[in-house]
Image (tube, grey):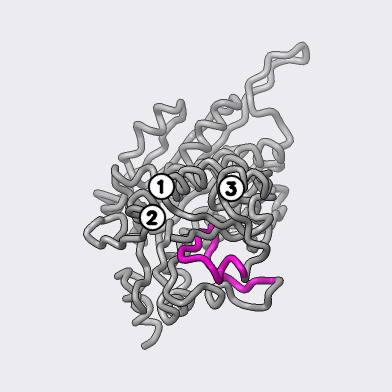
Amino acid sequence: MQIGVVREVAPGEQRVALVPETVEKLIRQGASVSIESGAGTGAYISDAQYEKAGATIAPDARALYASADLVIGIHRPMEHPALGAHQSDLLKEGSALIAMLWPLQNVDLVRRLAERRITAFSMDAIPRIARAQALDVLSSMSTVAGYRAVLLAAHTIPRFFPLLMTAAGTIPPARVFIIGAGVAGLQAIATARRLGAVVEAFDTRAAVREQVQSLGATFVEAELGTADAEDTRGYATALSEDAHKRELDLIGGRVRESDVVITTALIPGQRAPLLITGDMVQAMKPGSVIVDLAGEFGGNCELSSPGETVVAHQVTIHAPLNLPATMPVHASQMYSRNIASFLALLLKEGAMVVNFEDQIIHDACITHEGRIVHERTRELAGSAAQ
C-alpha cells in the first residue's frame, strides 16, 4: 500500500495530514509513505524530518497522485492553483482518499469521486460512538477552534478578562456567553475560565448541563418545549418555530449583558441556526466582541461576514473560517493521530480492507466501486438530480 500525503492548497491552510511520528508507525506496519515536498512547511516540519521517519519525498503533486494507492489530506479535493487541474482528477482511478469531504455540502464532488471509482472516506462522517473517540477529527479540531476563539476575543476586547485588584481600584471580570456546549463550546468555556472571565453557556440539550457546570460556568436554560434536542449521534437538532422564538428571547437577554459572545451552534447538513439578530447586536455594549464559529455554514449571527471581521454598532464581529489552521503544530499532530487510529481499522497487513460490517468504516465511506454508498449523501444526490 503506497500512502501519499498532499500539500494542502486551501487558502490559509498550514496543517499537514500526517506528522513524522505517525509516518514512522505506518512504515513499521508495512505501508510505504510518500510526502509531497513542502507538505509540512506550515506546521514547521521539514522534508528531512519525514525522510528520517522513513518516508520518500515526492517532488510535486502530480508525482504523488500518480503513485499513491491511498491519498490522505485535510481538505476536500479542489482546483489546484498551480496545476490548473482539479485534485479529484489527479487521483489514480480506483485509488482511495481520506479527507474531510463534508459530503452533504459537496454532492457534486461526491459524484465526481464516484465516477472515477475512488473509495472515499470522510473524516467528518465518523460516528460519535465510544469506540470512535480516538478517530474523532471534528472533536479534535473543535478543541482547537474553541481555544483559539477565546484568545481572539481576548485580543480584541478593550478590557481585561480577569478580576483585578489594583492600586487604581477593582476591575471587574469580563462576562462571556458561550452559545452551544459541544466540544468547541466546552473548550471555549474552559479557556475563558482560565483567563478569569465569568462565563455563562447555553445549549438546547439539557444533557450537557453537568459538563458546563463542571468547568465552572453557569448553565443557562429555558423551557423550550422539547423533550430531546439531540439526535441519536449526539448532535443538536433543529427546534420548532415556537421553541426557536423562546430561544431567541433568552439569548437576546444574555447577549445584551455580555462583553464577549462566542457562538458554536451547528446542525449537520443544514445552514447554521440564526441565533443573534442585528437588533441584539445593536443592544450590546460598545466595545463588545462576537466570535462566530459557525461562519463557514452561514453563521449564527445575522451580521457575520464569513471569513471577515466587521464592526457594527461598535461591536466587533469575527467569523473565522479555519481557526485550527492558525495553530498548525498541535492541530496537525491531533489530526494525524486521528488518521492513524482510522488506518488501524482500515489497513490489514499493509493492504486496505473495506469492512462494511464495521460501523465506523460503514459510516465514513462515501463512495466505493463507482457508487455513492453513504446513505444520506446518496439520497441528497438523488434529490438534486431530480
Labels 1, 3: front one? 1
Quick check: 138 left or right of 17?
left
Of the pair 228 and 123, the residue shown nearer to us = 123
Q: Quadrant of the N terminus?
A: bottom left
Q: Are marks 3 and 2 in contact (CB under 8 Å)?
A: no
Disc 3 element: helix
The answer, for residue 122, to whether it is visible in the render is yes
Of the pair 307 and 100, the residue shown nearer to us = 100
Give the magenta part as a residue range: 63-81
Q: Are marks 1 and 2 in contact (CB under 8 Å)?
A: yes
Type of amino acid at the residue the image marks with label 3: Pro
Q: Earlier in the sequence, mark 1 or mark 3?
A: 1
Which residue, given by chain and number where applicable, does mark 3 sit on?
324
Mark number displayed over residue 350: 2
Give the residue drawn at x 59%, y 56%: 35
Type of amino acid at the residue the image marks with label 1: Gln
Q: Position of residue 187 (x, y in %)?
A: 50, 37
